[in-house]
Image: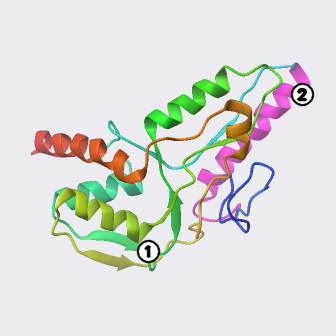
C-alpha cells in the first residue's frame, strides 16, 4: 500500500505514494482497495476485521517461478545463471522469514475486536538488493555473476516497515535474521531444482 514511499521507515499512518495508472497499479491499488472495503464493511455493518500489512516474506515452499526477488535469485544462483539486478541494485527491501510472519498473523488474529489494524508485519532489517544477491551467491557457493537491467517504472527505492505498533499491540517482532532464514530456503530450492531436472 505504500508504493514508492516518501517517508522511511513506513508507518501505518502513512498514506503512501502510489501511481494509480502505472504498471504496478493493479498490485499496489489492489491492496489499498481491499483495505478500503474492509473498513467500509467494518464501519457500515460492524464486520470484525483485522488488517496486516505484510512486507517481503520468504522461506521454504515458495514457488520457483513466483517472480519474487528471493526465489528468483536463489534459483538463478543454484543454476549458475546470471543474477538479474534491476537498476543499480541499491534499492532496499526488508525480508521476513515465513515463521516469523505466521507468528505475527496469529498474534493479530488473537487480539480483541477493537484492534483492527492496519499493523505492519515484517522484518525491519534493511538490505540492498545487491546485498541480498551477494548473500545468496555466498550461501549457494555459486559462480553466478550480477547483471544489470533497467529499473522498472515505479519500483520502490526503499522498503522498511516501522513495527512499533506490532511490538506494542501484539508483543511481536521477528527473530530470524536474513542470513539464518536463507539457509533452509536455499536447501528447499536445491531439492526442488534437483527434482525438476
Q: Nearer the viewer, mark 2 or mark 1?
A: 1
Sequence-first disc among 2 and 1: 2
Q: Quadrant of residue 40?
A: top right
The Cα–Cα distance between marks 2 and 1, rounded to whole angstroms, is 42 Å
Give the answer, above or below, for where 1 lies relative to 7: above
Residue 34 visible in the snapshot: no
Residue 63 visible in the snapshot: yes
Whether residue 20 is in magenta: the answer is yes
Where does residue 191 sit, x and y in percent of width and height?
A: 16, 40
145 to the left or right of 111: left
Q: How is the image coloured?
A: rainbow
> Is residue 100 or residue 75 the one in the foreground?
100
Write down the residue under mark 1.
Answer: 89
* Element marked by disc 2: helix
The quarter of the rendered structure image containing the C terminus is top left
191 to the left or right of 102: left
Determine the main secondary structure of the stretch shown in magenta: helix
Give the answer, above or below, for where 186 lies relative to 166: below
Q: Which mark is residue 43?
A: 2
* Element marked by disc 1: loop
Q: What segment is highlighted magenta in the picture?
A: 19-45
Amino acid at each position: 500500500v505504500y508504493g514508492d514511499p516518501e517517508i522511511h521507515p513506513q508507518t501505518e499512518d502513512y498514506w503512501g505514494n502510489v501511481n494509480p495508472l502505472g504498471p504496478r497499479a493493479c498490485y499496489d491499488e489492489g491492496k489499498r482497495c481491499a483495505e478500503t472495503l474492509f473498513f467500509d464493511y467494518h464501519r457500515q455493518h460492524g464486520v470484525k476485521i483485522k488488517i496486516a500489512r505484510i512486507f517481503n516474506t520468504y522461506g521454504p515452499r515458495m514457488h520457483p517461478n513466483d517472480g519474487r526477488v528471493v526465489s528468483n535469485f536463489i534459483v538463478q544462483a543454484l543454476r549458475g545463471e546470471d543474477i538479474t539486478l534491476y537498476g543499480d541494485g541499491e534499492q532496499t527491501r526488508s525480508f521476513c522469514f515465513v515463521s516469523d510472519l505466521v507468528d505475527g498473523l496469529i498474534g493479530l488474529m488473537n487480539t480483541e475486536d477493537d484492534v483492527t489494524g492496519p499493523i505492519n508485519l515484517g522484518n525491519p532489517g534493511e538490505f540492498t538488493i545487491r546485498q541480498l544477491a551477494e548473500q545468496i551467491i555466498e550461501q549457494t557457493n555459486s559462480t553466478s555473476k550480477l547483471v544489470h537491467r533497467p529499473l522498472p517504472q515505479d519500483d520502490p527505492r526503499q522498503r522498511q516497515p516501522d513495527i512499533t505498533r506490532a511490538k506494542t499491540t501484539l508483543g511481536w517482532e521477528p527473530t530470524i535474521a536474513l542470513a539464518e532464514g536463507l539457509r533452509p530456503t536455499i536447501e528447499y530450492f536445491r531439492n526442488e531444482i534437483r527434482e525438476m531436472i
